[in-house]
């Protein structure tokens, strides 16, 4: 899957995507990640990307021209990609939506908002507006990482030999994964449930099902 992220802060993505599963996904060619610096599409010699809002008010607003130029650039690399705008005004993100994005077999172009906002006209160029929760962050970078992580882990082969993503927490939107324990059997007086210590797989499955209910 090709994921292109448009941001003013490319450095924010370095650590996350060069570690753990996101690194593995790239190594095994399941993820082709490109970070696009919005500044490269800024206007004039100062590479201006923002301006004061019409109507007055605090803060700066991301200008439409650099945003559209960056989206056009990304679209040239991947014509069928879905364009997603990260915004607290978007549709609430859920596991179901993550699955939808993973299933649609198209790349993603994710736009990270910043400052006080973005010129609303960018919404004409996007397929979806997504919020990752009912709170306001300083920008769309963390939300973009949330989308990328939750979608990439659903690509067959990324989680490998571990429990398949489909069997796991929230995949049906109703249940959460059962609690897990590992050694030691007892820690500061807290014991691992007896049933998990025996080898009765039917009983273990039953216990896990009972403890998976939300
Ligand atoms: N940008 C700032 N806050 C956000 C949120 N909650 N979801 C998506 N994008 C955002």
Image: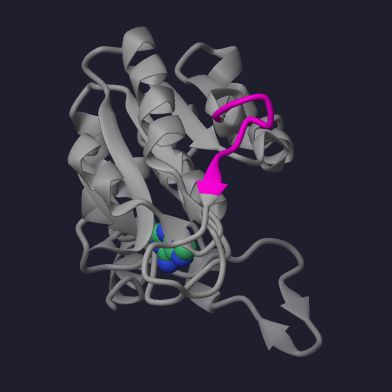
User: Is residue 117 found left or right of 99 in the rendered image?
Assistant: right
- Pick out the residue farthest to the bottom: 189
Q: Is residue 159 visible?
A: no
Q: Position of residue 86 (x, y in %)?
A: 38, 51
Examine the image and state in which quarter residue 81 appears.
top left
User: Is residue 121 found left or right of 62 in the rendered image?
Assistant: left
Location of residue 30 with respect to 113 vertically, above or below: above
Location of residue 191 with respect to 184 vertically, above or below: below
Let me know if residue 118 is in the magenta part. no
Q: Position of residue 13 (x, y in %)?
A: 65, 38
Rendered-image quadrant of the N terminus: top left
| Front-lying residue, 31 or 204 | 31
User: Is residue 81 found left or right of 59 in the rendered image?
Assistant: left
* Residue drawn at (55%, 53%) of the image: 142
Let me know if residue 45 is in the magenta part. yes
| Front-lying residue, 201 or 40 | 40
Rendered-image quadrant of the C terminus: bottom left
Q: Quarter for ligand 1?
A: bottom left
Q: Which range is magenta?
A: 43-50
Q: Main secondary structure of the magenta part?
A: loop
- Pick out the residue farthest to the right: 188
* Residue drawn at (78%, 80%) of the image: 187
**Total marks placed:** 0
Q: Position of residue 68 (x, y in %)?
A: 35, 30
Examine the image and state in which quarter residue 176 appears.
bottom left
């Amino acid at each position: 899957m090709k994921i292109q992220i448009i941001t003013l802060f490319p450095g924010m993505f370095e650590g996350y995507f060069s570690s753990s599963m996101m690194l593995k996904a790239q190594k095994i060619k399941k993820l082709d990640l490109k970070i696009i610096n919005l500044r490269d599409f800024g206007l004039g010699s100062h590479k201006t990307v923002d301006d004061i809002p019409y109507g007055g008010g605090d803060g700066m607003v991301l200008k439409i021209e650099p945003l559209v130029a960056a989206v056009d650039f990304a679209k040239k690399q991947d014509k069928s990609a879905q364009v997603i705008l990260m915004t607290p005004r978007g549709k609430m993100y859920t596991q179901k939506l993550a699955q939808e994005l993973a299933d649609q077999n198209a790349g993603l172009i994710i736009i990270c908002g910043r400052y006080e906002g973005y010129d609303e006209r960018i919404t004409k160029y996007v397929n979806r507006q997504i919020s990752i929760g009912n709170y306001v962050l300083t920008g769309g970078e963390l939300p973009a990482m949330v989308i990328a992580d939750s979608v990439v882990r659903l690509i067959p082969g990324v989680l490998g030999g571990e429990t398949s993503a489909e069997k796991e927490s929230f995949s049906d939107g109703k249940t959460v994964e059962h609690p897990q324990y590992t050694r030691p059997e007892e820690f500061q007086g807290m014991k691992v449930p007896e049933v998990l210590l025996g080898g009765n797989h039917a009983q273990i499955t039953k216990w896990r099902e009972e403890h998976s209910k939300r």
